[in-house]
Image (cartoon, rainbow, N blue to C red):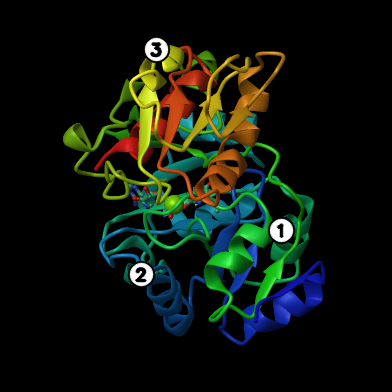
Amino acid sequence: MTIVSKDISKAAKILIQEDLVAIPTETVYGLAGNIYSEKAIKAIFEMKQRPFFNPLIVHIKSVEQLDELAKEIPEKARLLADKFWPGPLTMVLKKQESVPDLVTAGKDSVAIRIPNHPTTLALLEALDFPLAAPSANPFGAISPTNALHVAEYFSEKLQLVLDGGDCQNGIESTIIGFENEIPVLYRLGSISVEDVEEVIGKIQIKNKKENAPDAPGMLSRHYAPATTTFLESDVAQFIKGFPDKKIGLLLFKERIENTGVMHQEILSEKGDLKEATSHLYAAMHRLDKMDLDMIVAERFPDFELGKSINDRLERATKK
Ligand code: TXA
Ligand code: MG
């Protein structure tokens, strides 16, 4: 059975022994191991059932640690680091020789971020190595936003979840890389495109798998509930076609009255996209446990974090 605990020194001890610990971040929980331990990195791929061609994000404690892992860092990357770290921005940069190939899936680049969570920053401070950490879910499943989600996923295999409460942002970091110094977005996430562009100007968007062969993690079906899920602009109209089904709704701000549906999740009654984002995965987890025939999600306004939410919902509905 997995232990859920706030004990940072216990977590450090396990990581030093080259075993794995799930860690809290402001985005989602990560399944963490020492980047320099082949045993730990292999265990991450094994536990998640993640294909080896899908590289991991490296979590560091300070900007000073950046040069240990990356080289030829573009000026715009420095600006983004200044503005958003610690925080939910991952940057893909040219890697130093010292970064193991297993972590980067053999690529010559490495994905790096400084997470903004006091518990994990304290943990990193207690360690003399960075932590590789993909989201702490089996490959393709909904990412965990609290310690219990993680414990349920890995109860047989994982020793410890370091408990840092509910994740404040609630979806993964935004991933930005550079192709010939031109900034490219590989994954929509917790920081909106608008906020990134305010710092470094126009960026290219390669979030979709079709045009982003460089980001192997962008598989189109991902973040998916086991329950069949639909994404609709007019939910009230859509569900009229299924009067006999057990339906759960995932809605932005308002309940739909007079329906026979079993359950409705409202992500932000005041219509705040940031609040809605922070509630998204927990609501998907709850709906997925209700033994429904289908989940019907409402399409969000297509700007700022609404874009990131729509991206995750689209991936949740792909077959
Ligand atoms: O918010 C987050 O980023 C969370 C927390 C735990 O930090 N982590 C996370 O990791 O979402 P994961 O493994 O679920 O997603 C990592 C993504 C994948 O899509 C992967 O393909 C991409 O990062 N990635 C990693 N290294 C890369 C590289 N060198 N080039 C391009 N994409 C890379
Ligand atoms: Mg993931």
- Alpha carbon distance from label 2 to label 3: 39 Å
Q: Residue at x 36, y 69 (%)?
A: 49
Q: Is residue 152 above or below residue 149?
A: below
Q: Amino acid at mark 3?
A: Gln
Residue 49 tag number: 2
Q: Amino acid at mark 1?
A: Thr
Q: Position of residue 120 (x, y in %)?
A: 71, 58
Q: Is residue 203 above or below residue 67?
A: above
Q: Nearer the viewer, residue 175 or 238?
A: 238
Residue 237 tag number: 3
Question: For mark 1, does the 10 Å Cα neighbourhood hold few (<14), some (14 to 19), or many (20 or more) residues?
Answer: many
- Could you tell me which secondary element the residue under label 1 belongs to? helix
Residue designated by label 1: 120
User: Which of the two labelled residues, at mark 2 and mark 1, occupies the earlier sequence position?
Assistant: 2
Q: Position of residue 119 (x, y in %)?
A: 77, 57
| Number of the front mark, 2 or 3 | 3
- Could you tell me which secondary element the residue under label 3 belongs to? helix
Question: For mark 2, does the 10 Å Cα neighbourhood hold few (<14), some (14 to 19), or many (20 or more) residues?
Answer: few
Q: Amino acid at mark 2?
A: Gln
State left or right for residue 310 relative to residue 135.
left
Q: Mark 3 near mark 1, Cβ–Cβ under 8 Å?
A: no
In this view, the residue farthest toward the bottom is: 17
Is residue 302 visible in the rendered structure shown here?
A: no
